[in-house]
Image: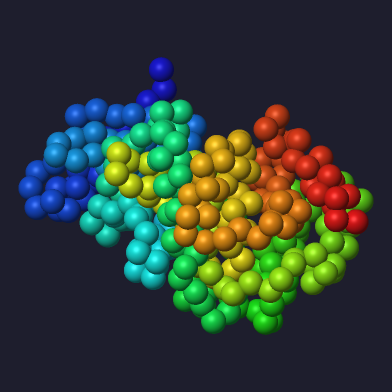
């Protein structure tokens, strides 16, 4: 059996060194759990005592930039919204001949199938709590982020959510999908037309709220006492952009949205706009994974969304 890249001696040594410095005493890995199926990078938990370390590996040259943005996003959400994010181990980043490692304290997770109704509800409350932090403009001047492996420009632009969503989310992802060669020209043209109609489709202008940025359900971790936001890519924007991604890949129980409403209202017309906010994500899947059995159906989802808002 091929050795997992996180079990390579150089990687384990780097994690042990960082974890030892983090707690001020020697730390040794005593086991490993593979979490590749839940991440776009090689990922897993290196177990030890009295704590374990969640690790993601990026062997490319862009790893430090991507992982630094993720760490900055976690810190911003903690500081401005008071929501929980995973504590970094040391600086949270280690580099070597293997590439770059993101290092976070591994938290005792309640897996999604085992969550109680109250724990699902806490996911919605945590997201709504983040949205209570408000900004002056849509976007984020401090730093850019990533949506999966794709760079994401956060620079504020224009004055409306329609301006920001078109120029910083929808049209850049459209270019990525077109460049992949996997998006039919007629579908791409439909997205371009839709982008021009966004001012008529976006509904009431929202106050810019602090967004998770990639709020699909796998990017929330539930412990026995808390909900923790993971894989964040924050900026200020429309709260519906996060709400639309909660059940982007798979349904979530109604308790999630009930929990959100415990803190903030959801516009009754949100379901009519949901596919607008998912469209940039559909384009990202086509750009990154459109040749796979998983990715191919997203071309149809894009075409359906364009037809819905024709």
Could you say which is closer to the camera, residue 8 or residue 69?
69
Displayed quadrant of residue 112: top left
Where 286 falls versus 155 (above or below)?
above
> Horizontal placement of 56 versus 225: left or right?
right
In this picture the colour scheme is: rainbow
Quarter of the image where the N terminus is located: top left
> How many badges with numbers are in the image?
0
Where 40 falls versus 24 (above or below)?
above
Quarter of the image where the C terminus is located: bottom right
Displayed quadrant of residue 87: bottom left
Q: Residue, x 60% and y 42% (percent of image)? A: 247
Displayed quadrant of residue 79: bottom left
Q: Residue, x 69% and y 81% (percent of image)? A: 158
Q: Residue, x 19% and y 35% (percent of image)? A: 48
x%, y% of residue 21? 15, 53
Could you say which is closer to the camera, residue 276 or residue 74?
276
Q: Residue, x 45% and y 44% (percent of image)? A: 121
> Horizontal placement of 162 versus 110: left or right?
right
x%, y% of residue 202? 75, 66
Where 208 falls versus 228 (above or below)?
below
x%, y% of residue 99? 39, 49
Query: Would residue 185 be visible to someone looking at this image?
Result: no
- Residue at the left extreme? 25
x%, y% of residue 120? 45, 41
Query: Would residue 250 be visible to someone looking at this image?
Result: yes
> Horizontal placement of 150 versus 5: left or right?
right
């Amino acid at each position: 059996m091929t050795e997992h890249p996180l079990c390579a001696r150089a990687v384990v040594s780097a994690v042990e060194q960082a974890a030892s410095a983090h707690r001020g005493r020697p730390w040794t890995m005593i086991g490993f759990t593979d979490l590749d199926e839940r991440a776009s990078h090689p990922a897993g938990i290196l177990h030890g005592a009295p704590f374990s370390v969640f690790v993601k590996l990026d062997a490319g040259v862009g790893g430090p930039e991507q992982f630094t943005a993720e760490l900055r996003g976690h810190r911003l959400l903690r500081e401005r919204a008071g929501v929980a994010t995973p504590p970094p181990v040391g600086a949270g980043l280690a580099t070597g001949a293997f590439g770059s490692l993101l290092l976070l304290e591994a938290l005792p997770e309640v897996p999604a199938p085992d969550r109680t109704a109250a724990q699902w509800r806490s996911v919605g409350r945590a997201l709504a709590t983040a949205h209570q932090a408000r900004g002056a403009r849509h976007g984020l001047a401090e730093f850019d982020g990533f949506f999966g492996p794709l760079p994401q420009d956060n620079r504020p632009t224009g004055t409306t959510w329609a301006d920001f969503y078109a120029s910083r989310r929808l049209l850049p992802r459209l270019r990525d999908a077109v460049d992949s060669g996997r998006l039919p020209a007629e579908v791409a043209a439909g997205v371009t037309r839709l982008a021009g109609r966004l001012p008529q489709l976006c509904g009431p202008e929202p106050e810019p709220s602090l967004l998770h940025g990639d709020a699909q359900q796998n990017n929330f971790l539930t412990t026995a006492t808390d909900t923790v936001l993971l894989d964040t890519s924050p900026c200020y924007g429309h709260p519906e952009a996060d709400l639309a991604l909660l059940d982007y890949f798979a349904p979530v129980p109604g308790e999630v949205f009930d929990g959100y409403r415990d803190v903030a209202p959801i516009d009754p017309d949100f379901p009519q706009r949901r596919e607008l906010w998912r469209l940039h994500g559909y384009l990202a899947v086509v750009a990154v994974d459109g040749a796979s059995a998983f990715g191919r159906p997203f071309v149809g989802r894009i075409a359906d969304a364009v037809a819905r808002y024709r």
